[in-house]
Image (cartoon, grey):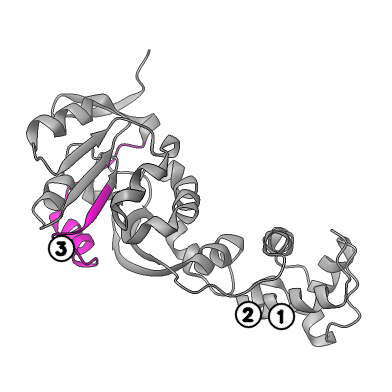
Amino acid sequence: MKTNSHGLAHGIALKKQYGQHFLREQSFIDEMISAVSLDTTSSVFEIGCGDGFLTRSILKQPIARLWVFEIDPAWAAYVRMNYPDERMTIVEENILDVDFSRLEETAPWTLLANIPYQITFPILHLLRENRHLLKEGVIMIQEEVAQKLLKTEGRGYGFPSLYFQHFFELSLLSKISAAAFYPPPKVSSRLLYFKPRTVLDEIPYEQEFWRFVKHLFQQPRRILKNVLQSFHYDYERIPKETLMLRAQQMDKQEIIGLWNILNTSDSKSL
């Protein structure tokens, strides 16, 4: 198989298809670890160890175990050889193919990872699906994506903002320039702290609600009246001032309130 590489590290080809950009500044690793609570009972997992720059610092902590999911066998072998530790298990598998039931016995887990940016949203959905196994974590993602996830109104605010804020407490940590990586990516990065919410807002017909939110934000500059008309909703019971709003002007509770009116008036026809 032909390898699409973009440089070498430790004599090993860095592969573009795996999004391999390795962080080189220890201060950001220290910040990731300081943001979470680790002790001798902690279960930690990492997505993509690369050359072990983060891995070695995790192993310096008083943890019970570290599971590393690494898709590239060359780097799995490198870390296994250079950072031997009986607490570490390296799984040579794509994180998106992992059966998370394997983590149940030693849950809850803390995630520390510099994730490949091209699979950021698939990983976020994976974390949502398995949030019952998670305690907290810090991931490094693209700055633009991190900002969108934290938005509560205006430009960039949309379905991902509402959806992931519903399931997780999110907060921004340090912004990281491309110069902190080898090879440098074409974008800035951001450390994002997350913690699963223990109590979720009650939303009737929740699956349909999220479908509704997607419709609202398909054309976020359109006023609600036009959006509801295009999807054949009866909006007579909705206040006129609300109908003149755009989706980007409404917070989550206002959108849930709108959804409740639409459902109590039995006007849903999507």
Q: Which mark is residue 257?
A: 1
68 or 151: nearer the viewer: 68
85 or 172: nearer the viewer: 85
Q: Which mark is residue 39?
A: 3
- Label 3: how many residues lie within 10 Å, few (<14), some (14-19) or many (20+)? few
34 or 92: nearer the viewer: 92
**What quarter of the picture does the C terminus occupy?**
bottom right
Q: Please tell me which residue is depicted at 10% across the width and 40% down the height of the picture.
A: 86
Q: Please tell me which residue is depicted at 85% across the width and 85% down the height of the picture.
A: 240
- Label 1: how many residues lie within 10 Å, few (<14), some (14-19) or many (20+)? some
Q: Which mark is residue 72?
A: none
Q: Spatial distance from mark 3 to mark 1, Cα to Cα?
A: 42 Å
Q: Which mark is residue 253?
A: 2
Look at label 1 and name its amino acid.
Gly
Q: Please tell me which residue is depicted at 8% across the width and 53% down the height of the picture.
A: 60
Q: Is residue 19 above or below residue 113?
A: above
Earlier sequence position, callout 2 versus callout 3: 3
* Magenta region, residue range: 19-45
